[in-house]
Image: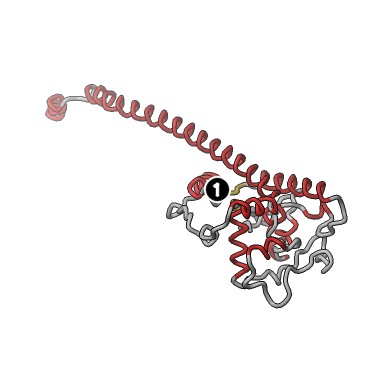
Amino acid sequence: MPDLVLHVTPGIKYSLLLSCISSVCIVLAFERKFYYITLLRDPVSRYLSEWRHVQRGATWKTSLHMCDGRTPTPEELPSCYEGTDWSGCTLQEFMDCPYNLANNRQVRMLADLSLVGCYNMSFIPENKRAQILLESAKKNLKDMAFFGLTEFQRKTQYLFERTFNLKFIRPFMQYNSTRAGGVEVDNDTIRRIEELNDLDMQLYDYAKDLFQQRYQYKRQLERMEQRIKNREERLLHRSNEALPKEETEEQGRLPTEDYMSHIIEKW
């Protein structure tokens, strides 16, 4: 699931994210400047990570899934399991549930669900619904001041620091050894996960391209700023080199010690 920080932008709506924000934060948003930021992740790795998380007993029972001022009905959002949690579920069981919110979670978290009738699947045809959600997620991602990619930690750090003019104490580390990375799955299973997360796959491809564009732009800007700084330093250095010569000329016009002694004796 994307990690986010608050930013209320007129005309931009993230249904699930805004529903997580308390009314106090909403009020503060009109007094201060806040930003949403997010880190996207490779959809297959993210999906496997969520499965392992659920397998260990995690639930999102406290999530209200508010959209257009109401929560979805049990018919609109059925549960994938009975009981207190879904601990111990197999990957096959996880993939087989048609109501699993892990499917295309990143698109859903970034999109404006009210455009498609929230969780009412009969509001518009499925293909049209999917396209609207994807375009909404892309637009909202593009309008964010910053987003990063889990698979590119160093570049993510660089972009964050350049965007907000902040410096982290330590460099980001690229940890490729994760719980999801430790799961051995065959090619057929990977293809199935990609199918279940087709919208997330498309969003991630879009995000990678946009991320690289932003990174290259910031790098070019940095190089240009460095050239300007170097030129200014060279000009300053030349000015400092010329300064001692001028001072020497001024000193040459001052009365000599002998001349001053002669003047003093006359007085």
Q: Nearer the viewer, residue 215 or 81?
A: 81
Residue at point 61%, 69% (across, down): 55
The image's colour scheme reads secondary structure
Does residue 210 appear to the left or right of 122 in the view shown? left
Residue 6 in the image: state x and y as whole percent.
65, 57
Specify whether residue 4 is in view: no
**Type of amino acid at the residue the image marks with label 1:** Phe
Does residue 12 appear to the left or right of 38 in the view shown? right
Report crowding for label 1: few under 14, some 14 to 19, many 20 or more residues within 10 A (C-alpha): few
Q: Quadrant of residue 261?
A: top left
Residue 109 in the image: state x and y as whole percent.
70, 56
Residue 239 in the image: state x and y as whole percent.
35, 27
Q: Quadrant of the N terminus?
A: bottom right
Q: Disc 1 marks which residue?
A: 164
Specify whether residue 188 is in view: yes
Among all residues in the image, which is located at the extreme right?
123
Q: Nearer the viewer, residue 261 or 169?
A: 169
Residue 131 in the image: state x and y as whole percent.
77, 45
